[in-house]
Every structure is written in C-alpha cells, then in structure tokens.
Image (tube, rainbow, N blue to C red):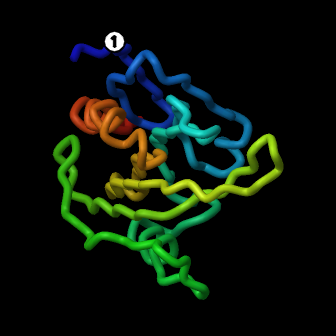
Amino acid sequence: MHRATQEYRLDKARFRCRLPSAWEPRRDEARQEREKVYGVLLRGKESQGVAAIIGIDYYAPGNKFFKDAQDYMKRQFAPRTIALKGERTEPVEWIKVAGIEGKLLVTHTFTHYQQKSHETVELPVREERAVLPFEGGFFVLTFSTPEALHKDLKPDFDLVLKTFRTLRRRLP
C-alpha cells in the first residue's frame, strides 16, 4: 500500500527525512532552545483515546538531561524500582540508521487512560527507540503505539528510519 509522504528538514535538529503525511507534526521551539533537545513529534492514529507517536529528537552536547547516548540508555532503561506486571523489554539490538551504528530498544508496557465512564483502563503499548550517537550529541528516534495499531503503523516508522539523514555542522 502506498502512503503519502512529505520531505521534512530541521536544521537545528540536524536531520532530514520523509514523514508520513497522515501524521501531525508538532514542535515547541522555545522549550527546545531551553533544553537543547531539538526535534519534532508526530501524532498519528488513536486507539481508545491513546495516540501513536513518532518522535525524532537530537540531544545536543550540553543538553539539560543526558551527558551522552550511553547515559540516556542507562537512565531510561534501568530496571524500575517497582516493576509493572506484564511489562517487558526485549534484548537490545544493534541498528544502523543513516550509516550510524546505534541501539534499538523495544519495550512492551502499558498506559492508563480514563474512559467517559471515569473507569481507568490499561492499554498495552509498544515503544521502540533507536539511539544513535552523533557528533558529541545523539539522536533518539521513537515509535510509541498502542499494540493494536503497531502492525498497521510500523511501516510509517520504518519510512522515517529508512529516509533519515543527518545534517553535518557547517564549519566556520
């Protein structure tokens, strides 16, 4: 099945790629400048009120949160103090995106949302994160989707991974 796409370039985040046109891009430029984390968040289809998300973020050197890609992985994927029943993380895989070797981390977890009846419901979610070191900083390409939508929307994330290209720093 052919999906409509659009070219997307974000110089501050140092990348370009093709994005699925059906996804809605969002940015908060002021926040990105404050935190030194630049990118775009795409909102896709929903399942039971929970939207699928594709995120492309460049954590610049000196960002507010992580020293480097290794620090990100260590802190984001450390075992939880209180494990969630049924949550599991697949073994880390090596991945190559745009010629950069990185790691792919896949977690099966849950999100909770409140229905109109005010009953809280648990919805299975699959999160995939490609972590790619790049020129002192690092990229995190995220795909988070309700499990029920994963198979249908995975080609959209694969498109981002396949067409993702870095933009090198211009030398003075």
**Residue at position x 54%, y 67% in the image:** 66
| Residue topped by disc 1 | 4
Left or right of residue 33, residue 170 in this image:
left
**Residue at the farthest right position:** 118
x and y percent of residue 26 in the render? 61, 28
Work out whether 19 lies above or below 119: above
The amino acid type, in three-letter code, at marker 1 is Ala
Helix, strand or loop at label 1? It is: loop
Kindly indicate the quadrant of the structure image that contains residue 159: top left
**Horizontal side, residue 165 vs residue 170: left or right:** left
Considering every residue shown, the one lying at the far bottom of the view is 81
Which quadrant does the N terminus fall into? top left
Question: At which x and y percent is residue 124?
Answer: 49, 56
Q: Position of residue 40 (x, y in %)?
A: 53, 34
Which residue is painted at 38% across and 14% down in the image?
6
The residue depicted at 42 percent of the width and 16 percent of the height is 21
**Residue reaching furthest front?**
117
Up/down of 131 relative to 99, above or below: below
Q: Position of residue 147 (x, y in %)?
A: 42, 49
Where on the picture, by quarter, is residue 89?
bottom left
Q: Nearer the viewer, residue 161 or 100?
A: 161
Q: Is residue 38 visible?
A: yes
What residue is at 47 percent from the left and 27 percent from the top? 10
Give neighbour class at mark 1: few <14, some 14-19, many 20+ (Cα, 10 Å).
few
Most foreground residue, 51 or 130:
51
Above or below: residue 10 compared with residue 88: above
Is 155 located above or below residue 134 in the figure? above
On screen, residue 8 versus residue 1, left or right, reads right
